[in-house]
Every structure is written in structure tokens, then in C-alpha cells.
Image (cartoon, rainbow, N blue to C red):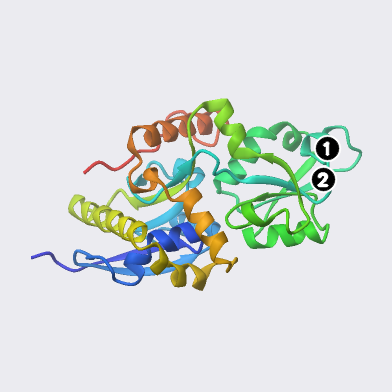
Amino acid sequence: MQTTKKIRLAISTCPNDTFAFHGILNRKVDLLGLDFQIELLDIQQLNEGLFQDRFEVAKASFHAAALLSDRTLVLPSGSALGFGVGPLLLSAKEGDSPDDALIASECTRTLCPGEFTTAAMLFRLFYGEAIASKKTRVEHKLFSAIMPSLQKRSADFGVCIHEGRFTWAEEGLFLVEDLGTRWELETGVPLPLGGILARRDLKQETLARVQSVIRSSIVYGLEHREETLPTMRKYAQEFDDEVLMAHVELYVNDWTVDLGEEGRQALSVLSQKAIEQRIMSPGQPAIEVYQS
């Protein structure tokens, strides 16, 4: 008989997570004796919580996973990665680009959704010259506050994630670049955005149970899509059902069920990019995927 094990689990409020974890949140799947103590937080809060050892298992940006590679493993199920899923760099004014700041007389202001988000890592990767020359200043804000800041012209650029990817044009904003598309062109692998991290000090038997339950929850959501809508609506910034399902279609895919070889290759490329940017030290272990 399996013993009851408490697991501090944290996920984001974005629709792909509430969709994937609907089965766990509503006890629709066998929890295999695990007592999940669940928190739903913003992605940057999740990243910071992992650094502070607040959770045994949590969703995190793969940027944070790179920094935590010596303390955590990535579970094979629950990741958000793929082609055409990247964050968007938006502008308050048509035709602007942070690269233009290199010849501008004044420093521009670019908002990112958290220091350890993959979105911030991509902006640093592709616009490092503008940052290094101090022609654009990066500041971090809650993801849901970025587009309103651009609309009020209190910032020049913003890296947009989650539902805003589908609504930016309606909000009167302008696309500078799809950072995911640029990643794909330069690397040839899907963009790894975030995944489920588990602490390395968890017992093998516990890790196996957690992985199995998460996979079951994802499969349940895929088989009961309409049933997940109330759960997604409860936490989403955008309540339109079509937008919520568009979000799921984009971010929940075969790699969410299991990373597979291509997903693992994408994480290997991300680790290498992190070393090139000196985010990870050369001696630090690469991001590792749990194997049962």
C-alpha cells in the first residue's frame, strides 16, 4: 500500500497550466497517494519560490531551470515548448525597434515579465548589444501589466507572454519581432519556454508517482477539453473561451505529454546558449530530464 506523501506543488495561472493540471486540481485522476498542496502563482513568483526551496515540484521558466540545474530535474511531462510559441516583442509605437535605440539620443525602456523568465533570456540573447550599450533599459513587471504600460506610453517596448500573444493588435500595440521565430531560425529546434521542475532530493519512488500523476492529468484534459474551461476561466486574464482554447492549442502538444528526444535536444541547446551568455557557468550541469 502506498503511503500518503505531501507535495508542495506550484503552477502558473496561465491557461495551459490550468488546463494540464485540471485533473489534479479537481481530483479527476488517481493521485497515487500524493497529497498535493497547490499554489497558483505568476511565473516569476514560481521561479523565485524554487530558488527559495518553497516547493518540491513547480512550473518554472527554463531560464530558471538552467540556473537551478544542480538542484532540480525537469519532469518529462508538463512542459511548454514548440514551434510558433515564443514571446512577442511589442512596441508602443509603429515602426519602433530596440535596435533603433543604438542610434537614438535617449535610452528607451523595455519591460520583461521577470528576471528569470525565458522571455527575458531571449531578449537578452537577441538584443544584448542594445542592453550592453545602455541604449535600452530592461525592467521587470508582472506579465499582465506590460501591455497596459505600453498603452499608457510609460514604456517603449515590452516582451509579451501568455494570452496577450493573441490580443496585442486589438489593444493598439505593434509587433516588433516574434522572439520564438527568431530562436527557431537560429537553432532549428523548438523553443523551450517552461517545464515542471522537481527537487533532486526527492526519493525515486516519489518522483515516479509525481510524474505519473501529472501525465495522467494532461491526458485527462486532452480527452475532456470542454470540462477544463471553468478551471481556466477561474484564473485567466482573458476570459474569452476561444482565446483560452487557442492558448491551449498552441502550448499543449505532444511535447507537453512527453518531451521525447526532440524536446530533450531543445533543452540541450538552451543549456549551451545559457553558457554562451554566462548565465550558467561552464562547470554547471546541463538541464537534466528525469528518467524513471
What residue is disc 1 on? 101
Between residue 43 and residue 170, name the one nearer to us: 170
Residue 211 falls left or right of residue 50: left
What residue is disc 2 on? 108
| Separation (CA) of disc 1 from disc 2 | 7 Å
In the rendered image, which quarter is residue 242 located in? bottom right
Between residue 196 and residue 129, name the one nearer to us: 196
Q: Amino acid at mark 2?
A: Thr
Secondary structure type for disc 1: helix
Q: Amino acid at mark 1?
A: Ala
Between residue 50 and residue 157, name the one nearer to us: 157
In the depicted structure, whether residue 251 falls above or below residue 274: below
In the rendered image, which quarter is residue 34 located in? bottom left
Near mark 2 (Cα within 10 A), the count class, few <14, some 14-19 or many ≥20, is many
Where's residue 62, x and y in %?
47, 44
Identify the residue at image location x=41%, y=47%. 253
Quadrant of the snapshot with the C terminus? top left
Q: Is residue 281 visible?
A: no
In the depicted structure, whether residue 285 falls above or below residue 22: above
Quadrant of the snapshot with the N terminus? bottom left
Where's residue 35, x and y in %?
26, 69
Q: Looking at the image, is mark 1 or mark 2 earlier in the sequence?
A: 1
Q: Are marks 1 and 2 in contact (CB under 8 Å)?
A: yes
Identify the residue at image location x=46%, y=28%. 282
